[in-house]
Image: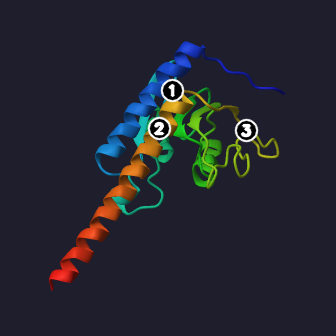
Amino acid sequence: MEKKSTLTNEEKETFMRAAIEEAKKAQALDEVPIGAVVVWNKKIIGRGYNLRETTQDATTHAEMMAIQEACRQVNNFRLEEAQLFVTLEPCPMCSGAILLSRIEEVYFGAYDPKAGAAGSLMNLLEDQRFNHWCYLESRILQEECGQLLTTFFRELRQRKKEEKAKRKENNKKD
């Protein structure tokens, strides 16, 4: 059985822009800028952004936070007929949570060649051996999503370089 998107291109862009806004919240906290939203009946019922550094908890990925909030909103772990929008391709942990929560459709912006489990390294979300699988669509506002990450890591590398030079200068003074 082939699954199909239930959303228009305009709706996809609107919801991905909401995920991008969540990613910017992570960026403001010096977190890797990844954001996600869960949509049900064309309304956002869950929002999340990356908080791993802040919480020192490896499970606080954007998707996990958005799924948890959505489950609380509907008072059920089953998010059937829901869509998830995330700025970066889900990892294996998040893909597992997506499958277990029965999210119907997943849309992401940028691919993650190092940890992606929705096409890059593997594709857990469309694997029909599981009792649930998703409709999957990539490259929604890909350039914008990817640029957030590129800029963040470029600035992080520059800060680290400046800190290293500052330490080196301080060591010379001692």
Q: 62 or 33: nearer the eye?
A: 33
Query: In this rendering, is residue 118 above or below 109?
Result: below
The tag earlier along the polypeptide, 1 or 2, is 1
* Residue positioned most to the left: 173
Specify the amino acid type for callout 1.
Val
Q: Nearer the viewer, mark 2 or mark 3?
A: 2
* Looking at the image, residue 19 lies above or below residue 65: above
Asked which secondary structure carries label 3, the reply is loop
Q: Position of residue 81 (x, y in %)?
A: 61, 26
In screen coordinates, is 44 left or right of 88?
Answer: left
Q: Which residue is mark 1?
A: 39
Residue in view at x 42 percent, y 27 percent = 18
Question: Label 2 near label 1: C-beta < 8 Å?
Answer: no
Identity of the amino acid at label 3? Trp
Mark closer to the chain start, 3 or 1: 1
Viewer-side residue, 143 vs 96: 143
Residue 140 is situated, as x and y percent measured from the top left of the image, at: 58, 27
Q: CA distance from mark 3 to mark 1?
A: 17 Å
Q: Which mark, residue 133?
A: 3
Identity of the amino acid at label 2? Gln
Residue that badge 2 annotates: 147
Looking at marks 2 and 3 on the same chain, the residue that comes earlier in the sequence is marked by: 3
Residue 19 quadrant: top left
Residue at 69% over, 47% down: 120
